[in-house]
Image (tube, rainbow, N blue to C red):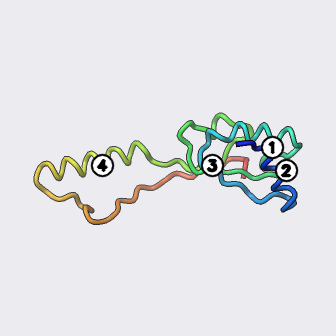
Amino acid sequence: MDWEEWLLKLADISKPPPPLLVNWSSGVPDLYRAAHKLGLRIGEELRVMAADNTIQGHRLSLPALSCVEIPYVGMGEEAVRCVLKQIEGGAAPEAAGKIWLPAVLRAGESA
C-alpha cells in the first residue's frame, strides 16, 4: 500500500481526512511514516484505529494506536472445547449457532 499517495488523494477529497480504520495493525507503521512525511499529526489531523492488534501495535506505535484486540486464544480454546464435547458424544452447546467472545478495545492516542 502506498500510504503517502493514498493520503494525498484522501486530502483532495476531505480536509481534514476522515478517521481511518486499518484492518491490521501491522500496516500502521508505514501509515504513520507517510503521515509524518506529509505533516499530518496522528490523533489530531489524522485519526487512526486498527481492527486487529495481533502484533501488539498499541505498544509499538507513537502515539499509541487505538485498536481492537480479537480474542484469538479464547477462540481456539472454545473451538477445542466444542470439538471435545462432540467427540465425547454430546453436542456442542451452540452447535447450530455462533459463539461470541468479547473483544477488547484498547484506547490509544491515535483516534
Local crowd size for mark 3, using a 10 Å CA cut-off: few (<14), some (14–19), many (≥20): many
Q: Name the residue under label 3.
A: 50
* Residue 104 rendering spot, x and y as whole percentages: 52, 51
Q: Tell me the CA gap for discs 3 and 1.
A: 18 Å
Q: In front of the other: label 1 or label 4? A: 1
- At horizontal 30% and vertical 49% (from top left) the residue drawn is 79
**Residue drawn 35% across the image and 44% down it:** 76
The answer to whether marks 4 and 2 mark residues whose Cβ atoms lie closer than 8 Å is no
| Dot 3 or dot 4, earlier in sequence | 3
Mark 1 — residue?
A: 4
Between circles 2 and 3, the one closer to the viewer is 2
Q: How far apart are marks 1 and 2 (CA)?
A: 6 Å
Callout 1 crowding tier (Cα within 10 Å): few <14, some 14–19, many ≥20: some
Horizontal side of residue 91 vs 38, given as left or right: left
The secondary structure type at the circle numbered 2 is helix
Q: Which mark is residue 79?
A: 4
Image quarter hosting the N terminus: top right
Who comes first in sequence, dot 2 or dot 3? Answer: 2
- Mark 4 to mark 2 CA distance (whole Å): 44 Å
Q: Are marks 1 and 2 in contact (CB under 8 Å)?
A: yes
Tell me the residue at 73%/37% (across/down).
62
Whether the residues at callouts 1 and 4 have beta carbons within 8 Å, the answer is no
At which x and y percent is residue 25?
Answer: 62, 42
Q: Distance between the residues labelled 2 and 3?
A: 20 Å
Reading the image, the residue beneath label 2 is 8
| Amino acid bearing label 3 | Ala
Asked if 63 appears above or below 102 in the picture, the reply is above
Marked residue nearer the N-terminal end (1 or 4): 1
Label pair 2/3, CB-CB below 8 angstroms: no
SS at badge 1 = helix
Residue 106 is situated, as x and y percent measured from the top left of the image, at 60, 48
Horizontal side of residue 71 vs 46, given as left or right = left
